[in-house]
Image: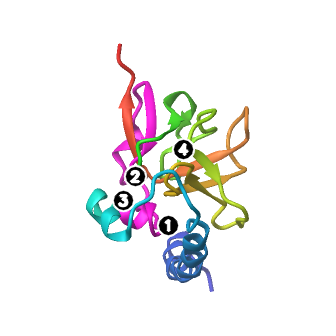
Amino acid sequence: MTISRRSLIFGGIPACLALGVAYRSASQAATANTFEVTHTTEQWHKLLTPDQFRVLREAGTEHPFTSPLLDEKRSGTFSCAGCDLENFSSENKYDSGTGWPSFWAPLKGGGAQQSAGGNLMFGTEVHCRRCGGHLGHVFDDGPKPTGLRYCINGVALKFKPTAH
């Protein structure tokens, strides 16, 4: 019996979703720390769109190739959609082909921080330092000079173009 690539991909989606439920519980525990910017669940719901809430506060993932920030090529910074802390620079953005905005490094002194743990399927979780919002994951298959791929949900970011 041969399995097509399409069957393998679409057959693997339900398994990934099931694993995601267990992973989300662990992620929520990781973001239960005290942060500079905190809100109640009700306040977060009022401040964020439903998609932003699902990603930033519940460690969800947006669908690949859906973010307008994927094709953003202007010079500027990418800030947390939850607290507006600058996390990534357009200078470190590249096309990873994965369907999510990707960066080879966060801003020095910026807000992106890696959580402890991680695994091959999900990489290491990346959170905003100021509000604890889930931004995405970092993997060790990126380009030089770091060899890292920060695979970030576009819905978790706001883009601010550089003024000329």
User: Real-space Cα distance between discs 1 and 4?
Assistant: 17 Å
The quarter of the picture where the C terminus appears is top left
Colouring convention used in this rendered image of the protein: rainbow
Disc 2 packing (10 Å; few <14; some 14–19; many ≥20):
many
| Marker disc for residue 59 | 1
Question: Residue pushed farthest top?
Answer: 164
Tell whether label 2 touches label 4 (CB within 8 Å). no
Can you tell which of label 4 and label 3 is closer to the viewer?
3
| Nearest the eye: 32 or 56 | 32
- Mark 1–mark 2 Cα distance, whole angstroms, equals 13 Å
Find the distance from the CA under tag 4 to the CA under tag 2: 19 Å
Q: Answer few, some or many: residues within 10 Å of disc 1's Cα (few below 14, many 20 plus, some between 14 and 19).
A: many
Label 4 – label 3 distance at C-alpha: 18 Å
Q: Which mark is residue 87?
A: none
Which image quarter is the N terminus in? bottom right
Q: Residue 82: which numbered mark, if any?
A: 2
What residue is rendered at 58% in x and 70% in y?
27
Q: Which disc is residue 102 wearing?
A: 4
Q: Nearer the viewer, mark 4 or mark 2?
A: 2
Query: Residue 16 falls in which quadrant of the image?
Result: bottom right
Residue that mark 3 sits on:
52
Residue in view at x 42 percent, y 52 percent = 156
* Residue at the image position 73 percent from the left and 37 percent from the top: 146
Amino acid type of disc 3?
Gln
Report whether 109 appears left or right of 135: right
Q: Position of residue 62 (x, y in %)?
A: 41, 61
Q: Position of residue 82 (x, y in %)?
A: 40, 52
Closer to the chain start, of discs 4 and 3, is: 3
Residue 52 rendering spot, x and y as whole percentages: 36, 59
Residue range of the region highlighted in magenta in the rendering: 53-82
Residue situated in front as seen by the camera: 130 or 146: 130
